[in-house]
Image (cartoon, rainbow, N blue to C red):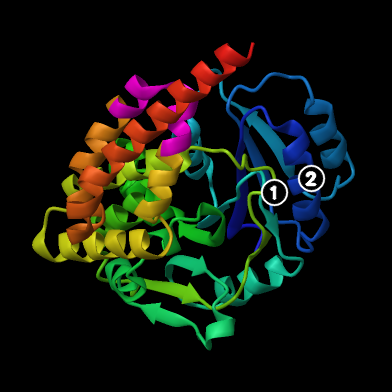
């Protein structure tokens, strides 16, 4: 298994967070799968905590690869896959804790004779969900019909050979916040080796115990998700793949990336950065709503500007009140 599977952890300026994640990863790495940390040119302060964790597990091959410059978060994820030399790779978020028996769960699939295109781990057991295997990643996306369900990088085992073939599209798709999904889908299109029967799995097993344990509760990430998703239309122009991906994108905005939550985030974004910055960011998102949320765009195209105007008024009134009070 050590020659078949690797774990890569991209990180930037979060040594203390990474130290906790790395310790749980190495503690439960019973078969000494190689672990590589890809540092996106972080400051050295706090690095010692990670080095101490690595030193506690001398029997496990674990190293740090440092980028000479910060290449961006998505590009660093793709660099992890590019650096991988095993047939399969897990790119683990630096603030995601794997379940204690993650090696057993992964090995159960990878020790078989199946040529996996990718394995997406999710915890659907509470809904009576069982493993589902597909002959193409598009069939998997169609079955899921929820782009967000496949978006979580830490729960997916990628076939590096397939991904390498889609790396160019993955790099160009970084703005979509789902470059790894684009890389997998496009890589499969390029790779269709008739001598192999690639399989794509939605697993009922749970791989992550705790996700985003250091995530900022006031993050504006949802804004950038909505800004990026419409770009997917230009990567999947064939009629069949376009409809599959667009349906999955709309599925994700019904279940996870909800526009009503986006409106709330824009309210606080306006309070934080002001009317002009929020309005400028809202306009292209508003333009792409018909792709991301379908007919609901009729409502949200006027509702989002209204939210920003209300937030700006609240900000002005609050400043006037504070001025009079002082």
Front residue of this view, candidates 110 and 297:
297
Name the residue: 69% across, 67% down.
102
Please indicate, yes or no, whether residue 232 appears anywhere in the rendered image: no
Q: Residue furthest left?
A: 239
Q: Quadrant of residue 264?
A: top left
Q: Secondary structure at mark 1?
A: loop
Name the element at disc 2.
helix
Q: Which mark is residue 20?
A: 2
Task: Give the vertical position of 248 relative to 123 (above or below).
Answer: above
Q: Which residue is mark 1?
A: 213
Q: What predominant SS class does the magenta segment belong to?
A: helix
Instruction: Check the image and name the residue furthest to the bottom.
Output: 128
Q: Front-most of 184 and 161?
A: 184
Q: Is residue 29 left or right of residue 161?
A: right
Is 273 colored magenta in this rendering?
yes
Q: Which stretch appears magenta?
A: 267-279
Residue 165 in percent (x, y) is at 32, 49
Mark 2 near mark 1, Cβ–Cβ under 8 Å? Answer: yes
Q: What residue appears at the point 53 percent right and 45 percent down from the top-left corner?
A: 84
The part of the image, by quadrant, that contains residue 247 is bottom left
Question: Which quadrant holds the C terminus?
Answer: top right
Residue 60 appears in the picture as rendered: yes
Q: Position of residue 230 (x, y in %)?
A: 24, 46
Q: How many marks?
A: 2
Q: Is residue 189 magenta?
A: no
């Amino acid at each position: 298994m050590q020659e078949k599977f690797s774990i890569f952890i991209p990180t930037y300026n979060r040594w203390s967070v990474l130290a906790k994640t790395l310790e749980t990863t190495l503690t439960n790495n019973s078969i000494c799968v190689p672990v590589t940390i890809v540092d996106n040119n972080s400051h050295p302060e706090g690095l010692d905590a990670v080095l101490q964790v690595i030193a506690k597990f001398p029997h496990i091959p674990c190293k740090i690869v440092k980028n000479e410059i910060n290449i961006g978060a998505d590009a660093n994820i793709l660099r992890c896959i590019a650096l991988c030399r095993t047939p399969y790779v897990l790119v683990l978020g630096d603030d995601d804790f794997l379940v204690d028996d993650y090696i057993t769960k992964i090995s159960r699939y990878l020790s078989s004779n199946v040529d996996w295109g990718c394995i997406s781990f999710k915890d659907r057991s509470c809904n009576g969900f069982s493993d589902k295997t597909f002959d193409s990643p598009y069939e998997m996306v169609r079955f899921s019909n929820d782009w967000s369900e496949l978006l979580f990088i830490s729960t997916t085992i990628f076939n590096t050979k397939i991904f390498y073939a889609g790396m160019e599209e993955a790099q160009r798709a970084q703005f979509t916040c789902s470059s790894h999904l684009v890389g997998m889908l496009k890589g499969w299109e390029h790779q269709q080796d008739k001598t192999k029967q690639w399989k794509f799995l939605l697993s009922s097993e749970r791989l992550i115990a705790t996700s985003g344990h250091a995530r900022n509760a006031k993050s504006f990430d949802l804004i950038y998700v909505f800004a990026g998703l419409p770009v997917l239309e230009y990567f999947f122009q064939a009629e069949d793949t376009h409809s599959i991906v667009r349906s999955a994108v709309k599925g994700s905005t019904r279940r996870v990336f909800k526009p009503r939550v986006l409106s709330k985030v824009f309210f606080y974004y306006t309070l934080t950065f002001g009317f002009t910055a929020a309005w400028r960011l809202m306009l292209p998102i508003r333009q792409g709503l018909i792709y991301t949320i379908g007919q609901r765009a009729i409502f949200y195209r006027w509702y989002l500007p209204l939210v920003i105007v209300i937030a700006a008024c609240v900000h002005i009134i609050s400043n006037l009140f504070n001025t009079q009070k002082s």
